[in-house]
Amino acid sequence: MIKNKAKNNSGKLSFSRSLKKYWILYLMMLPGLLYFIVFKYGSMFGLITAFQEFRLTKGVLGSQFVGFEHFAKFFQSNKFSTLFINTMRLAVCNIIFFFPLPIIISLLINELKSKRYKSVIQGVIYIPHFVSWVVVASVVVELFNTQDGAITQMINKAFGTSVNILSNENTFVGLITGEQMWKEFGWGTIIFLAALAGVDTQLYEAAKIDGANRWKQTLHVTLPAMKPTIIIQLILRMGNFLNTGFEQILLALNSSNRSVGEVFDTYVYQVALQNGKISYGTAIGMFKSVVGLILVVTVNKIAKKAGEEGVY
Amino acid sequence: MKKKLLATLLSASLCIGIVSGCSSSETTDTAQSETSSSEPQTETSETATQSNTEAESESLEPITITMMQELFSDSAPDLSDEWYTYIKDNLGVTLDVNFVPTQSYVDKITTTIASGDLPMVIAANSSVLKNQGILDMIADEDFWDLTDIIKDYPNLYEFVGEDRWTTSAIEGKNWGIPRLRVLPRNGGVIRQDWLDNLGLEMPTTFDELYDVLYAFTYDDPDGNGIDDTYGVVTSYVGTGNRGWNGFQTLAVSFGAPNTWGYIDGKMVPDFGTEEYMNALKFIKKLYDNGVMNKNFNEITAEDRKTEYMAGNYGAVFCVIDDIQGLQSGLVQAVDTAQSKVLGAVTQNKGDTIRIHSTTGYNGLVMFPKYGDGAIQSEEELRRVLSFYDSMCTDEYQDLLNYGIEGLTYETVNSVRTLTTTENGSLVLDVQKGDINQILPAADYVRKDDDNEMLISLYDTIEERMDYAVLDDSAGLTSATYNDLSSELDAIMMDAAVNFVIGSIDEDGYWAAYDQWLADGGQDVIDEFTEAYELYR
């Protein structure tokens, strides 16, 4: 009720008066707003180049418009299906194997009794997030390369069979998903732990009195409390569904896994920055973003239909 | 309750945004510090104009030439050092060079064109020359066309030589000064001390080469009683690697054309020939028997050098002028090691030697017309070219190769010996950095203080010059190839690698070739054939 009142009051205030009254809040909003205006909305201007035969020397205003030619060219090229399938494969694996991991980990961390131990664990599992992909990739090469990788040799000596992980079509998806899991599972727990911190302790007490054990408490108190967070995370994740991680994949690509490993992101890099075909690259990037937008909207609708709270 | 949750959630994700923003700024920081090396020069350029009023002897007016080029070493040279000051004092030219790390050079070119910030001179390597932005600029004549002007600069013209002005022309026009490279450059380096240890001779045929490399792998050439040696190391991770990584070197020796050959009235790519297949089978034999490194498609070109220099490999495929660097690295691991250029091999004893050859140049030094910082008038262009012309005289070639007496070299008994710093690098290299890439530098120079290894290297180069097999497509363009080069090249690179490691068989390789033809290769063949008949 109080909330509603406040809302009504502020709704009556004119913008200038509200600015005066809450100027400090607006000030705090400013950096974030600027970030979005400059780096997100501002750069959308460049999408025009997707419909042009963009010449670097002529600029956005001077280049000739060609309509949907680049999109048509891309959809007709035989790269399209390969890239699409490869990207989908990685994205689906990411949702199935990586997405639940931070949820499980944060549930486990939540069950820890010792506060000290808990914060040490949290600190330690955040660290891989700060390791750059270049470093991860070179460590992986050291461990798994076919000639003298540490783990390759261990398996070789122990079982007498040689394994090939880096140059193998069949292990590529596992390699990429595994790297992602190792690097980001800890970082992903932050949001879920924040959600868990907000769970009313009275609920647990009530559940205990009703005779619920730890497992039942998790199942009937913790998880329902986390559900909105999980769903919002899932919706937001959908927006990045086709963003498969550019650096990571570029660093893992080689001749033997390119057929399953080349994705939209690496192809855009190659086409736009290496070959300098800006328009074509922009068209592909734009296609990817549109798919992302459609996914967010659809999943959000489904979530709302199912009676959950969406992102908007 | 739910609203509150969403609020916590959003604020948490904002935190993440901020923190991860910090972490990613690390990478951009290093990029900035690399580029910021050009900042101090703007100051020096001001002082330059002052000090040059004193150097009245120079008839040409002083000028600051802005340049952009690749940085291969770890750090850029200090442009206020004596070497650069010498040029400023004597030629009235202040060099303002933006050194860009080689990994991001092509990207940087794209962004520099887009922002209209091109300097007066850029070094365009072969990847840059495939960039659509550069190709568009050439088509729009946004670079200065040197075709009719170069003859006015006799030193420069002679220095490059008529042949390379011709081969480096793009459809008959010279869009830049070719960066000279040794023609018979690709080959290999082998451990002479291992050959001696095992009592083997330098191989001259493919069978002998195989036997030698096999013995390197299994006969304990370093005599330590442990099976820790391999025959040969190479790397194939980029489409441009096959020139030096043994694939083309061996293929040409097997009789394949160099990249493209005009055979029976049409242009044929080397990878479409039976001879190339023979080379692949030879490499596959090395791979299958553990003689060659199994991770050749995973390690970078730099890694393969490191592997050789660690002393576990008996040979490495490389450009033969790398021998000096390889040897100096190798002796740090194994002090008795001795490297030698791998001899030319043929199929049977006494066959004519065929050596894979480069085009004789690697990219162009180009002079942009477009952009505020570029060369605006022909007058300005002529001033810059006259500087290049001066750099081609003996006096300034000596400056490039020896530097300044008493500082970068000492003369003892009329032999000029380059001085080294405490950590073993040449003072000259520290002073001038990689500037040779953008100034006129010879493909190789016999210096006064050359050691035996270098003398024998230059002898080898001169011997091989007669056997060099040239690329028939040099200087020709194909619109389809310009458009699809990276995809087409990748198809055949992947096919070659996968054939060697055994994930496809010979039929699979030819299926990939058919794919290449269907994806645009046939058009490339037709266009090159047409261009060849037009310009040759």
Image: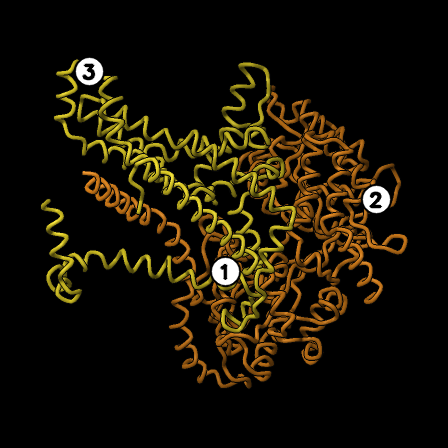
Chain colours: A yellow, B orange
Residue depth check, mark 2 versus mark 3: number of the one nearer the observer: 3
Q: Chain of mark 2?
A: B
Q: Chain of mark 1?
A: B
**Which residue lies under the disc numbered 1?**
B108
Circles 2 and 3, Cβ within 8 Å, touching? The answer is: no
Q: Chain of mark 3?
A: A
Dot 3 crowding, Cα within 10 Å, few <14, some 14–19, many 20+: some
Same subunit: marks 2 and 3? no
- Mark 1 or mark 2: name the one nearer the start of the chain: 1
Dot 1 crowding, Cα within 10 Å, few <14, some 14–19, many 20+: some
Q: Residue at x 50, y 31 (%)?
A: A175
Q: Residue at x 82, y 43 (%)?
A: B273
Residue depth check, mark 1 versus mark 2: number of the one nearer the observer: 1
Q: Position of residue B519 (x, y in %)?
A: 71, 49
Direction from residue B527 to residue A12 in the image, left or right: left
The correct choice, above or below, for B436 with respect to B289 in the image is below
Q: Which SS class for mark 2?
A: loop
Residue B222 visible somewhere in the drawing: yes
Which amino acid, mark 2?
A: Gly
- The CA distance from mark 2 to mark 3 is 81 Å
Same subunit: marks 3 and 1? no
Q: Nearer the viewer, residue A93 or B199?
A: A93
Q: Nearer the viewer, residue B482 or B151?
A: B482
The correct choice, above or below, for B523 with respect to A180 in the image is below
| The disc label shown at residue B255, or none | 2
